[in-house]
Amino acid sequence: MLDVIDPGQVEADAPQYNATLVARSDETSSLAYFTIRFDGEPVPFEPGQYMTIGVLVGGRMVQRPYSVASSPRTAAEGYELYVRLVEGGLFTPLLWELPLGHRMRMIGPKGKFMLQPNDQRTHLFISSGTGNAPFVSMIRTLIIDGASRPALFLNGVSYQDELGYRDLVEGWQRDGTFPVTYLPSVSRAADPRNADWTGRLGRVEAIVEPVCREFGLTPDNAIAYICGNPDMILNAEATFRALGFAEEAIRKELYWPKGKEPKLAAAEGIDPAVNDDE
Ligand SMILES: Cc1cc2nc3c(=O)[nH]c(=O)nc-3n(C[C@H](O)[C@H](O)[C@H](O)COP(=O)(O)OP(=O)(O)OC[C@H]3O[C@@H](n4cnc5c(N)ncnc54)[C@H](O)[C@@H]3O)c2cc1C
């Protein structure tokens, strides 16, 4: 039986540790960016892939996979991850309490949620919550490489202050650094936290069809990448299928198995690290 772990039980150092938490920046009380750097040479990865990070507690590695939000081109500086604190979760409450400079283990990369080579179709990047992380890595890398692809960047959240990377993506759009159109959406229209919100309303999957119509996106000129909450992904996928998109043109990264609650997945022995489209 798994219980909530006291962060004080996390081992400060261990032979399995190969990396260090070198930076952290908080977006809200439950959303933060963490940068973890390998002790030695950085491991190559493709934008869209994920790393698994963990800490040792009572001789057991408690670890979870996270999409890398930074570019592999800047891996020597560390791997930036964008994480939500899951109340009642096993790992994230530990991560939240780690001081800067704490040692940890990072392994990877894994995953097949990657850009297709030389694809000039319009890229529909669709995310809920922290599911925007792989898209930030993809665009950061394309910018560094001087390669561009037309993109629409949809991010759905409950409250406007949860729109991580908003300034970055809006900046790319505003100054033309990358041909991206940012389309954030908030779902809790009536909440005071969204009082001055004038953008799109509703869950991100609900704006997929209107956005395709508005921007003239069809199976002939677009490809969809969808990441985050499994219910959102399955609903968005159904919309794309109804619009005639082929399976090949709907790429998915599920952050947890459909229908799972915090701690349940781990307690049932399901390894979230293999929960992708491999
Ligand atoms: C390939 C892959 C990439 C991932 N990348 C990220 C990432 O970049 N950022 C990130 O925050 N998470 C990401 N996750 C989820 C992450 O691995 C953990 O599941 C999450 O941090 C919760 O861990 P926990 O031990 O605190 O909760 P657990 O005790 O493992 O509970 C898991 C449950 O928490 C809920 N949950 C998990 N992730 C989220 C989330 N992001 N938002 C809301 N609820 C959630 C679900 O109900 C899930 O069943 C990814 C998962 C996979 C499989």
Image: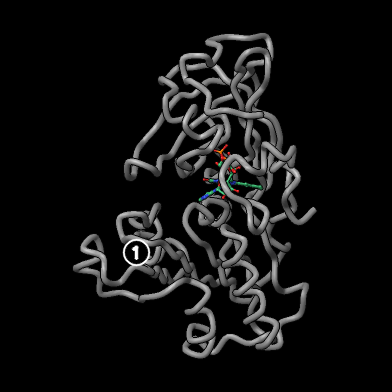
Q: Give left or right: position of 180 versus 109.
A: left
- Protein image colouring: one colour
Residue 135 image offset from top left, x and y in percent: 55, 57
User: What type is the residue that disc 1 sits on?
Assistant: Asp
Residue 73 image offset from top left, x and y in percent: 58, 41
Which image quadrant is residue 222 in? bottom right
Total numbered badges shown on the rendered structure = 1
Relative height, residue 50 to residue 228 (above, below): above
Relative height, residue 154 to residue 45 (above, below): below
Toward the viewer: 221 or 163? Answer: 163
Residue 123 image offset from top left, x and y in percent: 59, 71
**Residue in view at x 25 percent, y 74 percent:** 198
Toward the viewer: 254 or 247? Answer: 254
Question: Disc 1 designates what residue?
Answer: 175
**Residue in view at x 38 percent, y 69 percent:** 187
**Residue in view at x 26 percent, y 71 percent:** 190
**Residue in view at x 57 percent, y 28 percent:** 3
Q: Considering the numbered disc 1 on the image, is that residue within a helix, a strand or a loop? A: helix
Can you say which quadrant of the picture contains the N terminus? top right
- Where ligand 1 lies, by quadrant? top right
How busy is the neighbourhood of tag 1: few (under 14 within 10 Å), some, or many (20 plus)?
Answer: few
Relative height, residue 208 to residue 100 (above, below): below
Residue 61 image offset from top left, x and y in percent: 66, 22
